[in-house]
Amino acid sequence: MRDAILVENLGKHFNRYHVTKPFTIMEAVLSGLQRIKPVEHFWALRGVSFTVEGGKMLGVIGHNGAGKSTLLQLLGKVAHPTEGRIKMRGRVGALLDLGAGFHGDLTGRDNLFVTAIVAGLRRQEVAYRLDRIVKFAELEGFIDNPVRTYSSGMMMRLAFSIAVHTDPDILLVDEFLSVGDLSFQVKCLNRITEMKEQGCAIVLVSHDVSQVERLCDRALWLKQGTVMAYGEPEVVAGQYTSEMRSQTQHRTPHRPPQLTRTGAQLQVNQNRFGSLEAEIIDVRFLPKSAIESGDRLQVEIDYRAQPTVDSAIFSVAVSQEDSKPCLDVNSLEAGIPYIPLQEKGTIRLTLDRLDLSSGQYFVNVGIYKQDWSYAYDYHWHVYPLTVDSKTPSKGILQPPMRWEVVSSKTPQLLPPR
Ligand SMILES: Nc1ncnc2c1ncn2[C@@H]1O[C@H](COP(=O)(O)OP(=O)(O)OP(=O)(O)O)[C@@H](O)[C@H]1O
C-alpha cells in the first residue's frame, strides 16, 4: 500500500521565556518590551523522518517533553514545522488536545456539527450520521447540554466519535485512552482496529509501551526531540524499557539493608530498585501467602511518599522462581491513569482467581513515575507465594476444565471378503 504519511527531516524550534519575566501585555508594556525577550531557543523536534502506509499504525513513545505532542500538532497542521517536510495523503481526523476544538457554551450537538464540517463533511452528511455519532459516544441524554457541563470523559467520547465517523484516511490520536472508562477504551480500540483494516493510517501517541507493542505495526521512540529508535514495536519497546531500567538503577540511592515483615532482606540494587521518592513499606497477601490454585488473591501494598508524589503507577507481577513471567498487570492499563500519593496509603489489587499450577512463585511489586521513565520503588523476588493444586500439570496454568466426548462412532469392522 502507498504511504499515507511521509515525514522527512522534520524540525520544530521554540523559544523559552524565563519564568520571572513578565507574561501579561500590561506587565510587558510597563517594564519595557525588551524584558520579554526569550532566554533560550531550543528544538522541540529535530531530524525526525518516518513513513506510515495506509492500513498501518505507528506508535510514538517517549518520556514527558520528548516532543510527541509537537509531532502530532505538526502532522495535524495545528503548528508549522521550522524545517523538513510532511506529506499527507487524504482526509485527516485528529484527536489532539482534548476538547480544545469545542466551544463550551455551545451544545454537544452544535459542537458536533461544527467539528464534523471542519473535518470535511457536508451538512447533510453530518445530519445523516448524527444519531450514529451520538450513540457511539453514549451521549444520547446529554447531547443538547452545553459542552462546558461535560466531564473530560464525555468530551473525549464526543471528540473520538466525531473523529472516527468522518471517514478519515489518516487518524492522529494523542493519549486518548487515558481519559474515559475501561469499556469505552475497549470500544475505541475495536473501532481503531476496524479503521486500520479498512485502510486508515494511524499515528498513536502513548505512554504505555505494552499498548504500542500490542497494537502498532511500527514504533518511534522520541527523546528530547530526536529519534532514539524506529522500527519493530517489540524491539523499540525493549530498548525503551531497558533505558528505564538503567535510569532507575542510576537514581537508586544508597540505603542500608532493611527487613520486610516476613524477614526477607531488602537490599538496594539487588532486589530493590528505584529513586525511593515513594516507598513500598509493606506487602500483604490475603487470605495468605499459600493458596490453592483457582483461589482468589488480594495483594495489599502500603506505601509512603514524602514529599507528595503527584501521580504514580502501581504494578504487580507474578513470576516463577527462575524469573519466567506468569502475570504482569498495572494500574495504568487497568484504566486508572493517575494515582496521587500523599504521605501514607494502601493500594489493593484483587485477582478474582489465580489459576496457576502447583509451585513456588514470587510476587514482584512496583511503584513507577507516571510516564514510566523510572521506578520510585520496585521489589523483585522478595515476596514468595505458594500455590497448591490437587491435579498435576506440566504448564504454568491450571484453569478449571472438563473433558467431554461430544460424539463418537463405534468403529465398524469391515466384513471379511
Ligand atoms: N508552544 C510552545 N512554546 C514553547 N515550548 C513548547 C511549546 N510547546 C511545547 N513546548 C516544549 O517542547 C518540548 C516538547 O513538548 P511536547 O508537548 O511535544 O512533549 P511530549 O512528549 O508530548 O510531552 P508529554 O508526554 O508531557 O505530553 C517541551 O520541552 C515543551 O515544554
Image (cartoon, grey):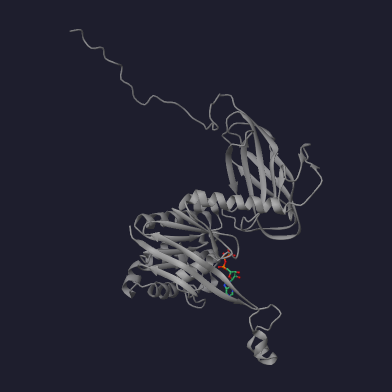
Q: Is residue 241 visible?
A: yes
Up-down relation of residue 287 to residue 210 (above or below): above
Outermost top residue: 416
Q: Is there any visible trace of residue 333 in the rendered image?
A: no
Left or right, 194 with respect to 18, comes to left
In-front residue for pair 83/342? 83
In which quarter of the view is residue 374 placed?
bottom right
Q: Position of residue 56 (x, y in %)?
A: 40, 56
Residue at the image position 65 percent from the left and 51 percent from the top:
246
Image quarter (top left, top right, bottom left or bottom right) of the C terminus: top left
Judged from the image, the quadrant occupied by ligand 1 is bottom right
Q: Residue at x 23, y 12 (%)?
A: 414
Residue 190 point in image, percent of width and height? 43, 54
Task: Give the position of the N terminus as an image quadrant.
Answer: bottom left
Is residue 404 shown left or right of residue 304? Answer: left
The residue sitting at the left extreme is 417
Task: Tally the numbered discs.
Answer: 0
Provide residue 376's location: percent of width, then percent of height.
70, 53
As drawn, 289 above or below 106:
above
Q: Residue at x 70, y 46 (%)?
A: 301
**Closer-to-camera residue (160/151):** 160
